[in-house]
Image: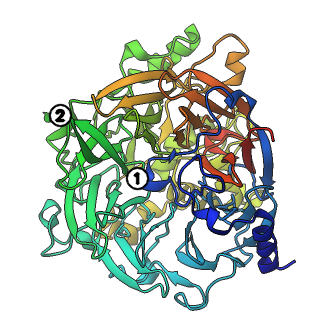
Amino acid sequence: MTGFLKTAAVGATLCLGALATALVSGQSGNVNWTINGGENNIRFSPLAQVNKSNVKSLQVAWTYTSGDHFTASEMQSNPIVIDGVLYATTPTMKVVAVNAVTGAEIWRFDPSGGSGGRARFRHRGVAVHQDRVFVTYRNFLFALDKTTGKPIASFGGDGRIDLREGLGKPAEGLSVSASTPGVVFEDLLILPSSVPETLPGTPGHIRAFDVKTGKQRWIFHTIPQPGEFGYDTWPQDAYLLSGGANAWAGVTVDQKLGMVFAATGSASFDFYGVTRHGDNLFANCVLALDARTGKRVWHFQALKHDIWDWDFPSPPSLVTVKRNGRSVDAVAQVTKFGYVFVLDRRTGESLFPIEYRKAPASAVDGEKAAEAQPYPTKPPPFARQGLTEAMLTTRTPEAHAAVLERFRKMKSGFLAPPSFEGTIVFPGFDGGAEWGGTAFDPESGLLFVNSNEMPWIIKLIENNDTSLYNSKCATCHREDRTGGPQAPSLVDIGKRMSHDDIVTLIRQGSGRMPAFPDMGARNMNDVADFLLTGVDKGKDPKVLSDPNRLKYRSDGESIFQDPDGYPAITPPWGTLNAIDLNEGTIRWKIPFGEFPELAAKGLKNTGSDNYGGPVVTASGLLFIGATNFDKKFRAYDKLSGELLWETTLPAAGNATPSIYSVNGREYIVIACGGGKNGAPSGSNIVAFALPK
């Protein structure tokens, strides 16, 4: 059956008609989930069929399996549901349309043209507007026919545009994509970007494209150019070299005000800012732009001269709060380092006082850390900040002793800069808050955010391949690569393994060898090249003479763990938080997630690392998957944090759920991809509903 006929059959079966536009619960018919993160990025559903009294009766309504997962693949898509059809992306970046009542596949599109193979993607889904589905794949933006899944030829060239074009630099030297879908305002698709954090860098400019033709209509330079506001917060002409400052987590549109809000990440290079002295606008900013023109309305910078990779991890949430007895439209922005900034939506003024406090200086030659950083006085941080000896694990005496020995050899403390000894960054590079973002309940004024509580380590090393190998590999394999009692020789490894095999082994680990998934693609490739050739490219005269070459590099971020692979601190290792934005207080906080093997030994409710966001409903429920190792999907009482229901998913639900109804039946759906930090991978989308 063709894609068109399949879709026609679905439409006839569901009898959607005008009911597909129903917006509130209580009406018979359908309620759609039309945009990534829900309207205003507050992940709120007006549906109330599933409530506190019957949620315990939820059961699987259908399961869709894409069948294309592999070791370490992920599936972060927030499904879009319109007119009884669900749209999502799979672990290998296929775009699928699925019957939202039965889970049957309607069509599938492979943007790679069949060459995608088993490439690892972190992608959060699609944008759907009128007759088309927008999706990014590597450096391309596609427009697909919503009915057939085929590229729309009139969009760009044969249904796609190249995102490397239009940035004001030669396209062949750039690397740009988008891991989070864009948003539509009038006839514009406003698109954020994902770019590397190396030098020379690709800028993270925010752009708007014509939804019909793909023509670029406006661009906002997140790294200002000569004559633009913020240019003086960088060295002269830094825009020619620097990259980053990108809104990789997505953007949010206020359709009534005609404003688009973005939250940007760090500038490149992210851990050593010798080429970018200054505050570096518009990195680490909440940005308010005119949605029609891209002109700046206001900005707020939460971290000056970021050298911790503490990107804003999620798109701004557009909330309405009570201040001095009146309603105020605001922007709520969470951070990796545990703060919530609440800003007036029209002016950018903070609704709670902000203090600027002295920050630690850097001891690394050439670095100039910011002298002061902003601290919101309310709400209080939802994550612990700055690791101390008193916080180190006591899970076993042996674990404590080992962690304490390592701790005393490294730098620590909130905002402690990267160092040659190694610096403990806490909250870590994965938060605090992460890309799953927040849910907001308009009735209670509560903002819900899940948080990681795991310290990470950053270490600066000489920028050459020998230093990288010695930092990561030589402890076991020896500096001469001859191996030892517990590690094989790496001499002549090219006779046994290919370059790609070595990179895969570094990323995934094997046997006694730990995985290094956050080592970074460049570092992995450089180690593989060094092992295969024995040549240290970092000492090549041509490389050394490059004026853009940095003296130091990171050896790759790593989680600070005890010898058994658990976080090096006392629990909780993950939390779920309800923050009262009216009062600026934390209403409740609970441990979130656990390790099944520890729970079996009696160590329960430890919390765990978690990725993916919550959804809140008008009926008083908070739904969230996210937890990495127990693979649970849970429903809580939104006012108290009481657990009301839970089930085990096929793989961790590292994604944000969607809630919709078709023909009056409510569904809660989540993508189950796993694959984070060594957790098993999957490729299922699972929908839950009450029994018929």
Residue projecting furthest to the right: 1
Residue behind mark 2 = 324
Mark 2 and mark 1 residues within 8 Å of each other at the beta carbon: no
Q: Vertical placement of 479 versus 118: above or below?
A: above
Residue 158 position in % (x across, y down): 60, 90
Q: Residue at x 67, y 31 (%)?
A: 55
Image-based side of 232 in relation to 589, left or right: left
- Of the numbered discs in the image, which one, if any, rests on residue 517? none
Residue 31 position in % (x across, y down): 60, 55
- Of the numbered discs in the image, which one, if any, rests on residue 315? 1
Residue projecting furthest to the front: 27
Residue 479 position in % (x across, y down): 55, 43
Image-based side of 364 in relation to 594, left or right: left
In the image, what residue type sits under mark 2?
A: Asn
Q: Nearer the viewer, residue 236 or 225?
A: 225
Q: Residue at x 61, y 57 (%)?
A: 528
The quadrant the C terminus occupies is top right
Q: Nearer the viewer, residue 624 or 235?
A: 624
SS class of the residue under badge 1?
A: loop
Q: Is residue 443 visible?
A: yes
The mark closer to the camera, 2 or 1, is 2
Q: Nearer the viewer, residue 679 or 352?
A: 352
SS class of the residue under badge 2?
A: loop
Snapshot quadrant of residue 65: bottom right
